[in-house]
Image: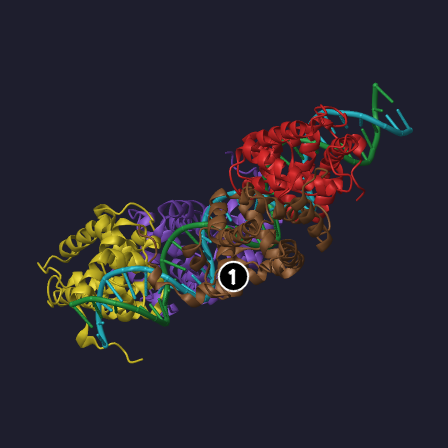
Chain colours: A purple, B yellow, C brown, D red, E green, F cyan
DNA sequence: GATTAACCGAGACGGTACGTCGCGTCTTCGG
DNA sequence: CCGAAGACGCGACGTACCGTCTCGGTTAATC
């Protein structure tokens, strides 16, 4: 039983499905997002979805891939004005805005929920979607190291987790209000450390 | 139709439901955990579940309450040997062990997933389950402040997030291996800060 | 896995399903009669149908049983005026009228088609629905034998087949116009035989 | 979109489709005979089938035409030894054998079922397939009339129905065992009539 | 012998119905 | 009146075929 031939795939249907899924996930609670609903909205047969995607999460993932390729193929880059704290604060504030906007909160939360339940999807996510972004973050931090604004001996992955982890965790677990102030507070603490100096 | 009368509630059925739910969530993927399955395993009618719990998440939540009350009613406390880093590392290593053990990982993950999707449940969780634990963490940090091992001007909630956030985030999002080493690295970074000194 | 408990069965749903099926089969070609359509018309869940009937044909059969029990429990009887030919002609004309009326033609044809394809259903049909009728026919013929109007040595089942078979066959196979004249012609031929006298 | 050009039709595909259909209808219940199944077995694209046949029944019909043309183009003829009863009995026994053999029973039953549901197909059937055979039967009966073995005033169509109707009806409706004895009994009754003499 | 238009196998497509599963409600019966 | 049991209306699941369509690749009549 051979897999379907991708060369025969209808690009129109593919985009219709991904767009419909992305729109629907903003309109209804994720638990109520159904394949039938997506197919109906996209004007597509259910079989077309089942033929090309193994799960609802995979559709969601592809939708993100499609929409984050607005900046087509470009490598993402963090601002680098030389002022590390200011640059990171700007990025975090943008993230806060995104996580606060229902149009982006809903799809990202849905994806995060799926990732939490599916290690295979998680791997794909961290390779294909989060990876490039994390690389950009690490590039910015390395630049700070070169400028002497960041300790040389710190593991950059740990640094990224320390800066973004608290914010993401609070967001995903509804752990408190998601504000610029909170982002600033965690950023300052991460940069300066908790110990007295 | 009057609300059910809690005084006539069967304690036996209640425990049977919570135990069945807790066991089942370890055996099957959370998406396949059904009310019918729980009722069947518990030897309980479906109506009994619908009468006393508003949602699957509520059952899960109660199951946690039941099981975390092994240390019946006692207020949780972190170790305080005077060595902050060592004490925190010990707690984090215990957490790593828990999050790594399938028996605890599965139910906690299921609860986390529900919390991510239900703000109301999130509030209850942070008040009733996470709250006391967070208070204990803050008590330990305040003690460290008194001993001069922690900066006086740091917001303790931010400090807790900084220490535990990266670990929880990596766990929930399958962001990488969950090891004692990683916990130590984030702990050290949190305590000392990222900036060169 | 025990079968469903018939004592719990909803009589209302049962009748709704049978009535809906009987009505629908008159309105749409039998090939387009769907379980979903029946369930929808009956205001009943699909599962309720699948729980109690093994096939569409079984529903149809039960619908016939229900509706032919208008003459509740009574044993059917053919007229017996002493004039065999006249009595049989009257019955055959009534049959022609029934087979010609779309309201009865459609359901009977559907049932006949299912019987042709399902020997098990055929047995049930010949025992429960056709049986009593055939018995009545044979009673009338036996009475004719007693009156000396019918040969004593003829097998009554063969006689019934000879009288009704040609008509039913023409009806089911669309073999020609279904008229009283045709019924009379076959009846006369059956009674008198084809050989010269 | 012009109609297909019959001159370019692939004879190979045509035969493959008809053979596949005829074989499949013997192997699976008729309700499970699908166009896709036929196309697959025939090694033919679905479009080729839809291009040349309007329905599944039409395929079946053509398959019969093809296979009954083994005796290519020849006009069928009933035996005529001068002994009417013996000749008819021989033909009926052959029919019984055919209707009893699964290899012929299945396809004939499928066709009969379609004819029962589709008057248009019925007409075609009675003209093209059944017609020549019925003509042969009537020729044999007319010869019997000429020999004084059959009443002159009997309608030959009625006579044919009287002789073959009961048998066909019993076959199609699974009305009882299909034996030579039963054929003989109906034949004798048809020839001699039911009335005492 | 090259061109070209239609047929061909293949199978993706938008649909409809299938038969199943679980939801949350309702009904029955026993303690 | 609670609780076990489970039938009910409902809606989504994932699958099977429907009949249409589009795609290259023959194939046969025309130039």
Q: Quadrant of residue C11?
A: bottom left
Residue in the picture at 19% in, 64% down: B13
Q: Which residue is mark 1?
A: C68
Which one is nearer the viewer's eye here, A94 or F15?
A: F15
Left or right, residue C24 beside residue A31: right
Depth check, front residue: E9 or B62: E9
Secondary structure beneath dot 1 equals helix
Viewer-side residue, B174 vs C196: C196
Q: Is residue A169 visible?
A: no
Q: Position of residue C77 (x, y in %)?
A: 53, 59
Q: Residues within 10 Å of mark 1 (few under 14, many from 20)?
A: few
Q: Is residue C188 above or below residue F27?
A: below
Residue at 60%, 60% in the rendered image: C81
Residue D193 is left or right of residue B169, and the answer is right
- Left-right relation of C141 to F9: right
Q: Chain of mark 1?
A: C
Q: Is residue B132 left or right of residue A64?
A: left
Q: Is residue C185 visible?
A: yes
Q: Tell me where residue D169 sits by quadrant.
A: top right
Q: Position of residue A34 (x, y in %)?
A: 47, 58
């Amino acid at each position: 039983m051979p897999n379907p031939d991708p060369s025969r795939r209808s690009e129109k249907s593919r985009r219709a499905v991904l767009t419909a899924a992305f729109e629907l996930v903003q309109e209804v609670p994720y638990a109520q997002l159904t394949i039938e609903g997506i197919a109906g909205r996209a004007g597509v047969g259910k079989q077309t979805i089942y033929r090309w995607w193994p799960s609802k999460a995979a559709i969601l993932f592809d939708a993100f891939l499609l929409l984050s390729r607005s900046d087509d193929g470009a490598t993402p880059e963090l601002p680098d004005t030389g002022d590390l704290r200011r640059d990171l604060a700007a990025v975090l504030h943008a993230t806060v805005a995104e996580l606060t906007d229902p149009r982006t909160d809903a799809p990202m939360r849905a994806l995060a929920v799926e990732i939490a339940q599916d290690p295979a999807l998680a791997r794909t996510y961290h390779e294909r979607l989060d990876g490039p972004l994390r690389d950009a973050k690490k590039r910015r931090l390395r630049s700070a190291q070169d400028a002497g604004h960041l300790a040389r001996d710190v593991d950059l992955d740990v640094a990224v987790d320390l800066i973004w982890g608290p914010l993401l965790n609070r967001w995903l677990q509804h752990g408190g209000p998601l504000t610029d102030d909170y982002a600033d507070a965690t950023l300052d603490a991460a940069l300066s450390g908790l110990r007295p100096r």
